[in-house]
């Protein structure tokens, strides 16, 4: 098997500086999309459980970089910070560990202009400090962490635009995927070093550390389930036939009264979909997206297939097999989000540990994931009911 390391994990100070500046430009470009729609004021944003007010996101992203890089603090230990925030009441407003989600719409936050100034000041100071750092993993850890954090929030802002029916700038729209022909790839049983090695570079705490994991022989689809394939499931009454749904999935289905994936609309005997506020004909060959774990499991039951485990997914992604393509959508796996043996939390202690055994692992990346963050070792995780994220599914043969 071939190995792969995401580019930012071993980035030099010069590379990190360029990436941090680009990430901040991207964040501000996305924020301007909300501002153009009048949603740069928190009170105007629908209070949905799956999003944050964009104004709060903007402040939080800058605060996070200030907290870990400039203030040299760790999560949940404000007394350890080297100095106070550059922003008055910054800790009271933008610490996600202490500011409840539901309260983020009613905070007395600074106006957008003031928060943009805060973003610029934090970035300027971060880049100045970075210019004096040695090429040392320990010294560069907080910069790499802040970059990954901002990249992930950038993707969240993009799916928030989708959730609110707002258009994304043309360069940020999803690229058209090149799908492989429907077929299975057979892999022999083998022992995989699951997780990341601990020698050098940045890695997330939930990837620590690599450990042997035997993966029995399996067959996995070369491509993601397409809209056309999923439409066959819908047409066959897949959402009405409860034998395909788990107990949790059936309960979700009853609450939602769903008969097709989110954003699908039936018009003139054909399916259409809403993409960033635009209604268009559903592209049959593209992978189905905005499906949650329950929908993915139900489709698999109907197709007499199953979801891959995260070990199987990582095995296939690292194999170098030309037919196994990934990176257009996050992919649900059959694996609950759990710690690897010997897990211990890193400085950002709340990143993984609070979500073990309540969330599900997704692997891969989406069209909205920056290339520097893409890695077959990366473990994404969401609640099973989340269908707002850029996620699809791939199946395995039983």
Image (tube, helix red, strand yellow):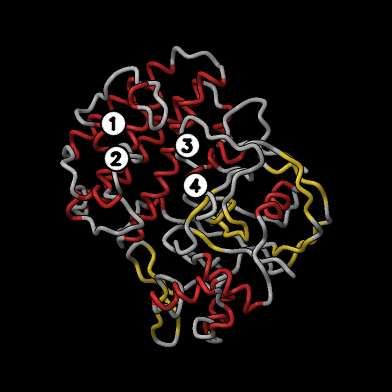
Residue underneath mark 3: 148
Residue 58: give its label: 2
Is residue 10 placed above or below 270 in the rendered structure? above
Residue 83 in the image, given as x and y percentages of width and height: 30, 18
Rounded to the nearest whole Å, what is the CA distance between mark 4 and mark 2?
18 Å
Q: Residue at x 77, y 53 (%)?
A: 215
Is label 2 in contact with label 1 (beta carbons under 8 Å)?
yes
Q: How dense is the environment of label 3, judged by Cα within 10 Å: few (below 14), some, or many (20 and up)?
A: many
Q: Residue at x 27, y 21 (%)?
A: 84
* Of the image marks 3 and 1, the number of the one nearer the N terminus: 1
Relative horizontal placement of residue 95, taking residue 311 as reference (left or right): left
Q: How dense is the environment of label 4, judged by Cα within 10 Å: few (below 14), some, or many (20 and up)?
A: many
Which numbered mark, 3 or 4, is in the foreground of this view?
3
Residue 208 in the image, given as x and y percentages of width and height: 63, 36
Determine the image quadrant of residue 218. Answer: bottom right
Image quadrant occupied by the N terminus: top right
* Of the image marks 2 and 3, the number of the one nearer the N terminus: 2
Is residue 293 placed above or below 344 in the rendered structure? below
Residue 119: give its label: 1
| Residue 216 or residue 321, whichever sits in front | 216
Relative horizontal placement of residue 181, taking residue 32 as reference (left or right): right
Is label 3 in contact with label 1 (beta carbons under 8 Å)?
no
């Amino acid at each position: 098997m071939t190995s792969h390391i995401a580019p930012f994990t071993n980035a030099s100070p010069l590379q990190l500086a360029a990436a941090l500046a680009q990430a901040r430009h991207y964040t501000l470009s996305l924020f301007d999309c909300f501002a153009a729609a009048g949603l740069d004021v928190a009170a105007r944003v629908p209070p949905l459980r799956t999003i944050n007010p964009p104004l709060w996101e903007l402040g939080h992203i800058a605060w996070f970089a200030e907290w870990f890089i400039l203030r040299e603090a760790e999560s949940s230990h404000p007394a350890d910070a080297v100095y106070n925030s550059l922003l008055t009441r910054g800790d009271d407003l933008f610490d996600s560990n202490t500011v409840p989600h539901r309260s983020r719409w009613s905070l007395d936050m600074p106006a957008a202009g003031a928060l943009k100034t805060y973003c610029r000041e934090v970035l300027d100071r971060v880049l100045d400090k970075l210019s004096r750092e040695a090429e040392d993993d320990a010294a560069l850890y907080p910069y790499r962490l802040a970059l990954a954090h901002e990249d992930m929030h950038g993707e969240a802002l993009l799916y928030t635009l989708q959730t609110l029916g707002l258009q994304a700038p043309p360069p940020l729209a999803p690229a058209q995927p090149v799908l492989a022909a429907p077929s299975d790839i057979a892999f022999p049983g083998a022992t995989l070093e699951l997780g990341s090695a601990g020698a050098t570079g940045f890695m997330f705490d939930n990837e620590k550390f690599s450990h042997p994991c035997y993966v029995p022989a399996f067959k996995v689809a070369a491509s993601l389930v397409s809209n056309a394939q999923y439409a066959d499931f819908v047409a066959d009454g897949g959402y009405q036939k409860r034998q395909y749904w788990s107990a949790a999935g059936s309960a979700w289905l009853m609450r939602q009264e769903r008969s097709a994936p989110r954003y699908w609309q039936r018009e003139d005997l054909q399916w259409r979909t809403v993409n960033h506020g635009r209604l268009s004909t559903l592209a049959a060959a593209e992978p189905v997206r905005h499906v949650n774990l329950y929908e993915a499991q139900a489709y698999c039951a109907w197709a007499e297939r199953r979801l891959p485990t995260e070990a199987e997914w990582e095995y296939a992604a690292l194999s170098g097999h030309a037919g196994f393509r990934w990176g257009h959508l996050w992919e649900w796996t059959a694996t609950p989000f759990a710690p690897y043996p010997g897990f211990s939390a890193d400085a950002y202690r709340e990143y993984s540990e609070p979500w073990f055994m309540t969330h599900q692992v997704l692997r891969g990346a989406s069209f909205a994931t920056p290339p520097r963050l893409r890695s077959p070792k990366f473990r994404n995780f969401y609640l099973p009911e989340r269908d707002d994220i850029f996620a699809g599914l791939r199946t395995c043969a039983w």
